[in-house]
Image (cartoon, rainbow, N blue to C red):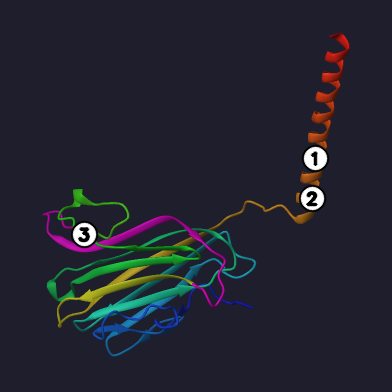
Amino acid sequence: MKKYLVGLVAPMLALGLAPSAQAVVTQTVIAGTYPSATQKAYFYVTEGQPQAPVSDTVVASFGNSFSVADTFDTTFAFIIDAIGIGSGGVSFNFSSLASELEFLSVTVKSGTFLQTYLPSGNTNSAGSQAGFINNTFNSDGTKNGQAFNASGIPIAADNLSDPSYIRVVARKITANGAGAYNGSLTYNRLTTAIPEASTWAMMILGMGAVGFAMRRRRSTVNSLRVAYA
C-alpha cells in the first residue's frame, strides 16, 4: 500500500533526469530535512491525507537552501492515490548579493502532463508573464528575487514507478552567504463520480430502448402516409 504523497525525492537517474553537466549538484531526499555539505532540501505534507481515503485538499511545502556557489538540480516527487487538480509555486528573495539565486528552470510532471518553465527575462514588474519564471522587484525597481506560479495542472493517480514531481534547477551565484527558495503545492481531488459498470449497462439499455421506440414510431408514420396516399 502506498503510504505517502510527498517524501520521495527520487534519484535523478531513476526518473530519467540525469544532470546536464557534472557541475550540477543533485541530492536524494526522503521525507523531512536532510542536510548535506552544500544544500538542505525538505518536502512535507502540511495538510490532508494523500493515501486512500484521499482528502479533498492536500497541501505540501518544499524548498532547498545552499551555502556554496553552484547549480543545484532537485526533484521533489510525490505519490497520490486519486486524480485531481494541482496548483502551486516556488520563489526566493534576497537582500544582498551574497544570498542571490537564479532559477534556471522549473519542470512539472504528472501522468502524461510534462511542462518545463523558463525565466521570462523581464526587467520590471510590469513584464510578468504567465507560464514563466518571473523576476520580483523592490519598490525602487531593483530586483529582489524570482517567482513561479502555476495552476490547473492535472494530477494523475500515481504509482511508485511513475511518480508526479516538480523539479527545480537553481544556481547559487556567489560563494559566500546562504541562499534559499521555498514553495508550496496544493492538490484538490476531483469529486465527480464515475458511473459503475452496472450503471453504464442500464444507460446503454435505456438508450437502446429509446432508439427502438423512435424507429418504430417512424415506421408507423410511414405506413399511415402510404395508406392515405
Q: What residue did someone put label 2 on?
A: 201
For marks 1 and 3 on the same chain, the one whose residue lies earlier in the sequence: 3
Give the Cα separation between the discs numbered 1 and 3.
59 Å
Outermost residue, right side: 227
Circle 3 sits on which residue?
Answer: 135
Q: Is residue 24 left or right of residue 12?
A: left
| Residue type beneath disc 3 | Asn
Marks 2 and 3, the one that precedes in the sequence? 3
Q: Which residue is denoted by mark 1 in the rendering?
A: 208
Q: Earlier in the sequence, mark 1 or mark 2?
A: 2
Q: Is residue 19 left or right of residue 229?
A: left
Choose top left, top right, bottom left or bottom right for residue 226.
Answer: top right
Q: Residue visible at 20% across and 50% down?
A: 127
Residue shown at 57% from the left, 74% from the top: 159
- Closer to the camera: disc 2 or disc 3? 2
Q: Nearer the viewer, residue 200 or 139?
A: 200
Residue 151 lies in the magenta stretch = yes
Q: Quadrant of the N terminus?
A: bottom right
Which percent across, then down, holds residue 3?
59, 77
Chain part drawn in magenta: 136-163
Please tell me whether mark 2 sits on a helix, a strand or a loop.
helix
> Could you say which is closer to the camera, residue 56 or residue 75?
75
